[in-house]
Image (cartoon, grey):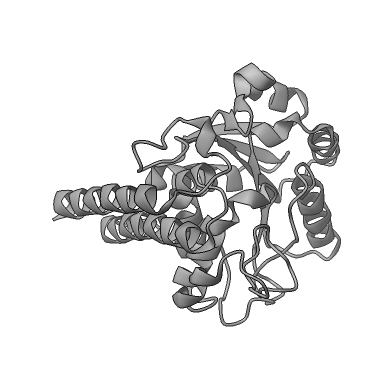
Amino acid sequence: MLSDLYEDKLKDLEKKAEQARELVIKSLLSAGAGHSAGPLDMADIFIAFYFHILNHDPKNPDWADRDRLILSNGHICPIRYVVMAQAGYFPIEELQTLRKINSRLQGHPHRTALPGLETTSGPLGEGLGQAIGIALAAKLDKKKYYTYVMTGDGELDEGNIWESLMFAGKNKMNNLIMIVDRNNIQIDGFTEDVMPLEPLKEKFEAFGWHVLESDAHDIKQFVDIINEAHAIYEKPTVIIAHSIPGKGVDFMEKDFHWHGKPPNPEEGKKALKELRTLKGKIISEQE
């Protein structure tokens, strides 16, 4: 059972999420490359993980009893890097090295380059299988940590995702929780145009998973859903997290063209202005 998310802490997490979005834009501007939409829409969930949900220690990233967070859709790693920096895994200034030669912060996560990363990711569809291996090891070793795995919805086009879903369902892996970034876009367009996924909930259920749904931008609701997932003992759980791609930047929101490109300097300036206005509004509403 997670600790209670009191109002003061919730306000702090919401502020951190808006700061994270600003840092994502600054990182992408420095890199001149990378993905925009997914990192922006997963800011609230990554903040919830690193500052409330995960049992982890930035000063001891290899702690044996830590929870594991696997990023299968590795292209959204700018938000993971940003939140890891906020949490104290490495200096925030290092975010400006995103995608640069010899940087620890490559365009897809490299496990041996940066302490705190559980896997190397890039090819879509592999992360769930890796997470299952980690969760299975926990059961064999009688460890109590949870394994969480983040996937994209476009990633669900990959066949090996469904092979992994079958395995986890068959083996009733109740220490495994999958989060799907349901932002409805992928690099070639909207998911339901490229390869329709619906009815997604029923498909997961048919593969033996308990299915929950959440607003990806409501931190309290997401934490409550994680608590509910922890109470499921007979099967693995998948959380369909409904998100707005490019969240917080009006000209990026719900536009699939921002799946795989960064803002140029002028666009970045506009994006930062919008995000700072949004952050100011959130702070004002909280006071």
Asked if residue 197 is positioned above or below residue 159 in the image, the reply reads above
Where is residue 282 shown, x and y percent of the image?
Answer: 22, 50
Where is residue 259 shown, x and y percent of the image?
Answer: 55, 39
Q: Is residue 67 left or right of residue 132?
A: left
Q: State the image quarter where residue 161 is shown.
A: top right
Asked if residue 30 is positioned above or below residue 287 in the image, the reply reads below
Where is residue 213 shown, x and y percent of the image?
Answer: 53, 32
Q: How many marks?
A: 0
Seen from the viewer's position, the closer of residues 242 and 269 is 269
- Residue at 39% in and 54% down: 265
- Residue at 64% in and 63% down: 67
- Residue at 44% in and 40% down: 246
Asked if residue 133 is positioned above or below residue 173 in the image, the reply reads below
Q: Quadrant of the image for the C terminus? A: bottom left
Q: Is residue 110 left or right of residue 153?
A: right
Seen from the viewer's position, the closer of residues 24 and 44 is 24
Seen from the viewer's position, the closer of residues 7 and 264 is 264
- Residue at 14% in and 52% down: 284
Where is residue 16 shown, x and y percent of the image?
Answer: 36, 60
